[in-house]
Image (spheres, grey):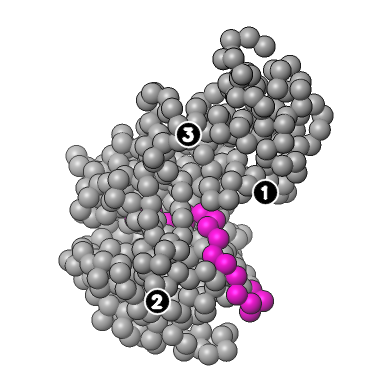
Amino acid sequence: MTNAEPGAALIRVVLPYHLRNLAGVGAEVSLEVAAPATVRRVLDALEARYPMLRGTIREYETGQRRAFLRFFACEEDLSHEPMDAELPVAVASGKEPLLIIGAIAGG
Amino acid sequence: MSSVRVLVGTKKGAFILTSDGKRKQWQVSGPHFGGWEIYHMKGSPVNPDRLYASQTSGWFGQIMQRSDDGGKTWYQPGLKPGEPEMPAFPATAPNRFLYDQSKETGKPLTTHQWYDGTQHPWEFKRVWHIEPSLTEANTVYAGVEDAALFRSADGGESWHELSGLRGHGSGPHWQPGAGGMCLHTIILDPKDPDRIYIAISAAGAFRTDDGGKTWKPINKGLVSTQSPNPTAEVGHCVHHVAMHPSRPGVLFMQKHWDIMRSDNAGDQWREVSGNLPTDFGFVIDVHAHEPETLYVVPITSDSLHYPPEGKLRVYRSRTGGTEWEALGNGLPDRDCYVNVLRDAMAVDRMDDCGVYFGTTGGQVYASADSGDNWAPIAEHLPAVLSVEVQTLQ
């Protein structure tokens, strides 16, 4: 991990196809997130840099994850972890990305 | 020379069809927002290059899009690409539709009737219909599910509910139709800026005469025989309402069943289904220059959402209803089992009025001669949700 402010980490985030297009970015973005890195802080940083994503990952009013999205990292499903839980060390260190996944739903 | 731009919202993106005034050769651009449901697109009558689009997804929620160049480029209002990165959350929130819960309204309704008869909280799901102001390009209305009316005065950067509608008092009796509890029709009176008509499935039609502060149900004369109280003040499954701009007090309605007409701004309705083969359907529209000429697309029944006998037919009345003629030149004569959804018909304002409609089979049909002859102008799109037309100078 390099180039982050002291006390902050560069977190890698992989977005689903439609959100990449909405934000005009590639598959993966890097975000500077204050330590300790949590899902909430990552999403705050993501939405601050890409405000067009506001409301697409978590509900406007409740801040809760939208029902058909999931958060994965290090082969773990973090979707039901508290938003303020610390992310795995591998994610916080930039070694592994946080994956935001559109659930396979529909038909 | 005039030209025509057709805005088509589909289940998998938006398409823009353009032609010169002859309306013979069409160019198709799109898909815009590929893979997203585009419930509705509509242009500002004040500035035709100002378009608004409702982009939705079960995964990612509601996105409002705006174009200032006739649909070539799009952006979320207030979040124009290339502008400096926001240091914090911007003040604009183009996708935020927050129901008014304030004490100031005096009636912060929180529930409506659910399928099982219990009360259910209002939950925003999507924007069904966009209606730009007739006088201000930056003012635009949005009809949403769960049913409510929102207004933006800043080009879609922020939205505020006209909560007097839900505050009418009948809200707890509104209930969702099969497609959800949507506010799908918004009609602005060109002669009285304080008068607005809206319609909700399955609540009925409402009117405000004071710019949206207070509303009254306008459902007298509607008969919904499937309901416990067929003539109730609210609880009618109105599918669409149309009005000719030269006669704002005359309304035409495609109800779940029945074609209805009102000559007094909705205070009283009467049935004008006449000789239609079936009066179930979704769309209804009025000829651009003949206020007594109407168009509907009869659908077999509420159980069979396709045309009778597999023949796609538009029906036209030149007498304001009751007497109808089938129009089929150029439309499928057999094996056609598509539907035409409530916002998927529109007319242009060319001297010889053009009529357009889209199907759930992905065809967009057009007639350049008031319905006498039809031809497909796009044939293999995703299921069409909405069709709007702009006549450009």
Q: Residues within 10 Å of mark 1 (few under 14, many from 20)?
A: some
* Residue B83 higher or lower than B267, as above or below: above
Q: Which residue is mark 2?
A: B168
* Residue B66 higher or lower than B343, as above or below: above
Q: Camera-side residue: B260 or B231? A: B231
Rendered image quadrant of residue B35:
top right
Answer with mark 1 or mark 3, whichever residue precedes in sequence.
Answer: 3
Under mark 1, the amino acid is Ala
Disc 1 from disc 2: Cα separation: 32 Å
Residue B125: within the magenta?
A: yes
Q: Residues within 10 Å of mark 2 (few under 14, many from 20)?
A: some
Q: Give the letter of the chain under mark 3.
A: A
Q: Residue at x 50, y 27 (%)?
A: A49
Residue B356 in sight in this render: no
Q: Which residue is mark 1?
A: A67
Under mark 2, the amino acid is His
**Percent position of residue B336, x then y:** 58, 59
Q: Which residue is mark 3?
A: A51
* Residue A92 as seen in the image, left or right of residue B296: right
Disc 2 from disc 3: Cα separation: 35 Å
Q: Camera-side residue: B152 or A9? A: A9
Q: Camera-side residue: B221 or A81? A: A81
Asked which secondary structure carries label 3, the reply is helix
Evaluate whether label 1 is on the same chain as label 2.
no
Q: Give the letter of the chain under mark 2.
A: B
Whether pointer 1 and pointer 2 mark residues with C-beta atoms closer than 8 Å, the reply is: no
